[in-house]
């Protein structure tokens, strides 16, 4: 059993003497763990968020397996060392992948969304909004996608402004206004790429994605939301970028 693919590093942990178990997320193979030899070159390479070229091999498919020497393709994590908020965003994104996706199942669209997010992170004012889109993409990949295409009440496709916290379906401003106190706000940029980003939109998008991640993913497993996500929102709030 073997494969070769580019992959995003999710993390690494000690495994005996002189070895690490590296976990990566590839487009065609999903989240995989494998043993690598620890060394001066391997440890910096295995920072979460880096893009590597990986070859995985095992005698039997159910075994942990080994990575042949990993090759660094893009040192994304290193490039963000001077931006602690972007590093927090990167940490939150890879933690969600590790916590929410089953092992050895491919999610090509989610992989592409993660690449887009990571490559956008040098753009300080842009990536937080892209991050929230990534979280909605994670929900969709796991089978819990929201229906933001039309109003659940009227069928209209314009002026969508709310989302039901129970069904995940959208509603127009007028249809949802009588129930505004229990509905989640739908920021325009999530459904219109040309919409201007207003103050509070990113916070509303985090609240929307977070509600369904918590209810449909983590609560079902008896788990809480990853702490790294809370820290990211806290940092963005202190910086006035929500």
Image: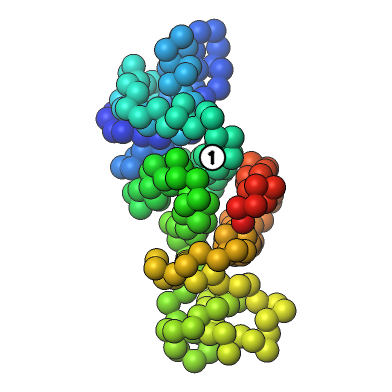
Q: Residue at x 55, y 12 (%)?
A: 16
Question: Is residue 97 visible from the viewing direction of this image?
Answer: no
Q: Is residue 86 above or below residue 22?
A: below
User: Residue 67's spot in the image, x, y percent?
Assistant: 36, 21
User: Residue 14's spot in the image, x, y percent?
Assistant: 56, 17
What residue sits right under mark 1 in the picture? 86
Image quadrant holding the N terminus, namely: top left
- Count up the numbered dots: 1
Q: In the picture provided, is 145 more to the left or to the right than 162? A: left
Q: Residue at x 63, y 72 (%)?
A: 184
Q: Residue at x 54, y 40 (%)?
A: 86
User: Residue 102's spot in the image, x, y percent?
Assistant: 48, 45
Q: Quadrant of residue 231?
A: top right
User: Residue 84's spot in the image, x, y percent?
Assistant: 59, 35
Mark 1 secondary-structure assignment: helix
Of residues 60 and 20, the one drawn nearer to the viewer in this rendering: 20
Q: Residues within 10 Å of mark 1 (few under 14, many from 20)?
A: many
Q: Quadrant of residue 62?
A: top left
Residue most extreme to the right: 181
Question: Is residue 2 visible from the viewing direction of this image?
Answer: yes
Q: Is residue 164 above or below residue 28?
A: below
Q: In the picture provided, is 236 more to the left or to the right than 7? A: right
Q: Residue at x 39, y 50 (%)?
A: 113
Image quadrant holding the C terminus, namely: bottom right
Of residues 155 and 140, the one drawn nearer to the viewer in this rendering: 155
Of residues 49 and 166, the one drawn nearer to the viewer in this rendering: 49
């Amino acid at each position: 059993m073997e494969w070769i693919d580019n992959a995003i590093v999710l993390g690494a942990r000690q495994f005996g003497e002189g070895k690490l178990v590296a976990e990566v997320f590839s487009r065609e193979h999903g989240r995989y763990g494998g043993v690598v030899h620890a060394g001066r070159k391997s440890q910096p390479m295995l920072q979460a968020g880096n893009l590597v070229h990986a070859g995985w091999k095992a005698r039997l498919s159910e075994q942990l397996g080994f990575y042949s020497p990993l090759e660094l393709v893009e040192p994304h994590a290193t490039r963000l060392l001077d931006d602690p908020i972007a590093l927090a965003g990167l940490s939150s994104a890879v933690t969600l992948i590790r916590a929410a996706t089953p092992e050895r199942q491919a999610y090509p669209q989610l992989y592409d969304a993660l690449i887009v997010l990571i490559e956008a992170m040098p753009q300080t004012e842009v990536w937080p909004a892209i991050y929230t889109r990534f979280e909605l993409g994670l929900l969709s990949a796991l089978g819990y996608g929201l229906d933001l295409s039309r109003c659940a009440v009227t069928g209209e496709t314009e002026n969508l402004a709310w989302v039901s916290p129970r069904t995940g379906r959208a509603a127009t401003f007028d249809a949802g206004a009588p129930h505004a106190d229990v509905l989640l706000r739908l920021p325009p940029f999530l459904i219109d790429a040309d919409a201007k980003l207003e103050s509070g939109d990113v916070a509303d998008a985090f609240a929307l994605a977070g509600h369904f991640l918590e209810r449909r993913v983590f609560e079902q497993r008896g788990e809480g939301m990853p702490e790294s996500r809370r820290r990211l929102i806290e940092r963005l709030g202190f910086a006035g970028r929500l």
